[in-house]
Amino acid sequence: MNSTQNNIDSGPEALAEMEPYMNDSGATSSHSDVSDMPMIHFDEVSKLFATGKPALENINLSILPGEFVSLVGASGAGKSTLLKLIYAEEIPTSGIVSFNGRDLSKINRKHLPYYRRNIGTVFQDFKLLPQKTAFENVAYALEVFGRTPEEILDEVPQILDIVGLEEKGRSFPKQLSGGEQQRVALARALILQPKMIIADEPTGNLDPVSAGGIIDLLLEINSLGTTVILATHNQTLVDRIGRRVIALDRGRVISDEMVGRYIMPERRRPRIIA
């Protein structure tokens, strides 16, 4: 067993404490089966930078199980901070962020790995291990949680097939295109069967065709019941998706439309004095 596994407390008391936060691969709260209860809820949430400047101000929103939400806004609008609050990398300065009705700030830090099994994350820069093959990058997530070699050999090819990389399992990241690397990252995010995928600018380094392919995969994953939160600057992709769009500007929600389009904040033009 590796050191990462040793850091995960799996005793009965820990499991009982984490039960409301865990996905179906462990214990599952009855909340998870209630489709009209928010999976994620922000209640008057604000987050301040160390300088005291607000990153987010008075955020109130709910995300239901099975939703596809595009989170849009310029750089610095607060998108990344909001996502970090969801996967509990940050805690709010004030207000409550909850998952299935439970306050995320109350999770014991050593139990965070159990909560994060609910969430698969995909980033702009792929975050693949360069010395590992596509197969090994995906398998690593299973190894951390103690899956047997037999389980890994069974599950990883299936997930690579889902993302269209069944023939690329032995390839290293440097041998793959940008689009293929992002598909490996998506396969890794999916391998623990999370309830939610958070995709933070996943198409930022991709050409339009590859970007469209990643969005198609996210839509397919969403159609199977997985909640998807997509943070992006790409107006064309957001308008093509045609699902819920939450727009942020300067740390505040300026628009939340169930069937929305990319909204740009109105800027006051400077007054010209003749």
Image (spheres, grey):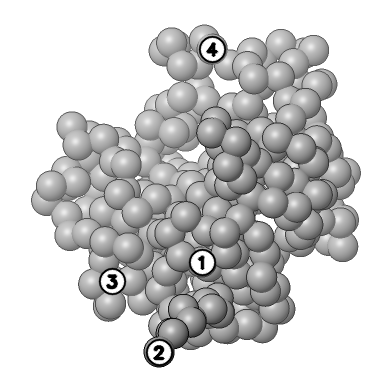
3 shown above or below 204? above
Labelled pair 1, 3 in contact (Cβ < 8 Å):
no
Q: Secondary structure at mark 2?
A: loop
113 shown above or below 116? above
Q: Which of the numbered marks, if any, corresponds to residue 73?
A: 1
Residue under label 3, please give it: 210
Instruction: Indicate the position of residue 79 as horizontal and vertical percent values.
Output: 54, 55
Residue under label 2, please give it: 274
Is residue 168 visible in this depiction of the protein? Answer: yes
220 shown above or below 184? below
Residue ID at (63%, 26%): 112
Q: For marks 1 and 2, give the one nearer the viewer.
A: 2
Specify few, some or many for label 3: CA neighbours under 10 Å numbering under 14, 14-19, or 20 or more: some
- What's the amino acid at mark 1? Gly
Measured in 3D between alpha carbons, the distance from the residue under mark 3 to the one under mark 4, in whole angstroms, is: 37 Å
Q: Earlier in the sequence, mark 2 or mark 3?
A: 3
Is 35 left or right of 9, judged from the image as shown?
A: right
Measured in 3D between alpha carbons, the distance from the residue under mark 1 to the one under mark 3, in whole angstroms, is: 22 Å
Q: Earlier in the sequence, mark 3 or mark 4?
A: 4
- What's the amino acid at mark 4? Asn
Measured in 3D between alpha carbons, the distance from the residue under mark 2 to the one under mark 4, in whole angstroms, is: 67 Å
Q: Secondary structure at mark 3?
A: helix
- What's the amino acid at mark 3? Ser
Q: Which of the numbered marks, if any, corresponds to residue 7?
A: 4
